[in-house]
Image (cartoon, rainbow, N blue to C red):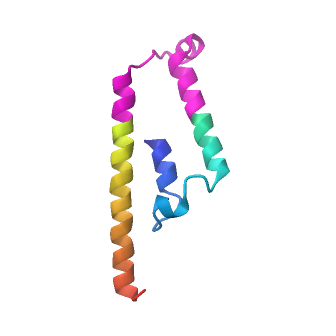
Amino acid sequence: MQMMNVVLCRHPFKSSFALGLFGNRYILLGLAAELGVILFIIYTPAGNWLFGTAPVGGGVWLLATVGAVLMWVLEEMRKAWLRRMLASRFGA
């Protein structure tokens, strides 16, 4: 969900669709690096030993994905509402 949050917080009003996903290569690089570290910590014996973790099942990934999608939908709704409020207030 934090990875989704980074995508959503790039602009306070504009939709993530308007900004595009591939506009900032540093964000993409950071997300890829974060995912790589997460996978190392969770699914390798070295990561399990270093951090005291254990592999998680598909249900955990499904729950995280559903949470991220829900966050995305709610944030897009909030931004759309905010754009309408600003347009009605300032006549834009």
Image quarter (top left, top right, bottom left or bottom right) of the N terminus: top left
Image quarter (top left, top right, bottom left or bottom right) of the C terminus: bottom left
- Would you identify the image quadrant in which residue 65 lies? top left
- Decide whether the magenta segment is chiefly helix, strand or loop: helix
Q: Is residue 24 left or right of residue 8?
A: right
Give percent across and percent down for residue 46.
60, 12
Residue shown at the point (34%, 77%) measured from the top left: 85
Is residue 39 one of those drawn in magenta?
A: yes
Determine the residue located farthest toward the bottom in the rendered image: 91
Residue shown at the point (37%, 45%) measured from the top left: 69
- Would you identify the image quadrant in which residue 50 lies? top right
Q: Is residue 74 left or right of residue 21?
A: left
Write down the region rendered in magenta.
Answer: 35-64
Q: Is residue 14 above or below residue 56?
A: below
Report the number of numbered marks: 0
Residue shown at the point (56%, 10%) measured from the top left: 45
Q: Is residue 14 left or right of residue 83?
A: right
Q: Is residue 32 above or below residue 8?
A: above
Residue shown at the point (39%, 89%) measured from the top left: 91
Is residue 38 one of those drawn in magenta?
A: yes
Give percent across and percent down for residue 71.
36, 49
